[in-house]
Image (cartoon, rainbow, N blue to C red):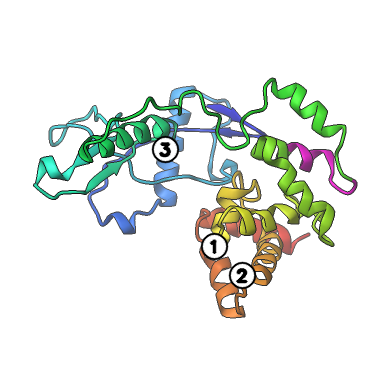
Amino acid sequence: MVPWREYTLLGVWHVVYKGNPDEVQLTEEEVQQFLDEFNSSYGLSEPLGLKDVSTWNFGLTLFGENNDGAEDLSYGKQSRILDHARDDGTEGLITVVGVRYTMGRGTARQVVDLVLKNLGRSAPKSRTADTPLKGGDIGPFDDFVDGAMANRPEGVGPESMYAILRNHGTDYRSVVEYACRLPGATNVIGASNTIEAEVIHAVRDEMACKLTDVVLRRTDLGTGEYPGEDALSRCADIMAAELGWNEARRMREIAETRAFYPPFVVRRAREASAHA
């Protein structure tokens, strides 16, 4: 159990999947099986159930070297870099299979070094270990937040401002610029702390092309729980205006985003909205 913002993360849980990688799905039965395992391990006085789940994250991970039928399974812990010129004689092709995001910069350094080696060029010393991520040159975070909050623009609430600072670091000014310049851009979307300026910034400056890009990856709008129909609709309206979507595309984007969430969570949100 790991605290994360106002939520608690539970995991991880693995099963062997041998189907089509493009068709991998998670079922309510599998979630309940995991919760049963969790409850048995922790001995909670009030066991967790589906009612306590706000969202899920699932996908495929590399599989380690295991014998068929083994009970204690080993999962891949290192990224795979395949030099096809060496492995099968295909010149100029390198395949990278990343195992986790936190190893991305180290894996990228290895790949760039390999590319230069194959080109017969010497590799300069990598700067990735000393180069901050975009917006990451902030120094002590509390001092950074205090300074930015002192100049918080009118109309942007403290919770929204803090989320922008946490997500964008020193690049927060590009989001705030939209909030100050565009009418309605300081409006909060649904019951979240996400303001409309963040959606606009995601499209114009962060290459967001899909509603899922914004809801799940560029903002906090839907990272912890289903944001609700009204929030999805408003976010889709903003993106439609920015990207020229017609109504059919807008509805398709909403449906695809809704499908990311557990069906029982969506049902619960709709029932709560209907009784509000």
Q: Earlier in the sequence, mark 3 or mark 1?
A: 3
Asked whether disc 2 touches disc 3, contact meaning CB atoms under 8 Å apart, the reply is no
Q: Residue at x 43, y 36 (%)?
A: 101
Label 2 SS: helix
Residue 229 pos. (x, y %):
67, 63
Residue 269 pos. (x, y %):
65, 56
> Residue beneath label 2, please?
243
Residue 109 pos. (x, y %):
36, 32
> Residue beneath label 1, please?
209
User: Quick check: 116 above or below 141?
Assistant: below
Left or right: 196 in relation to 207: right
> Residue beneath label 3, please?
34
Q: Amino acid at mark 3?
A: Phe
Q: Amino acid at mark 1?
A: Cys
Label 1 SS: loop
Residue 163 drawn in magenta: no
Classed neighbour count for the residue bearing mark 2: other residues with Cα under 10 Å, few (<14), some (14–19), many (≥20): some
Residue 131 seen from this side: yes
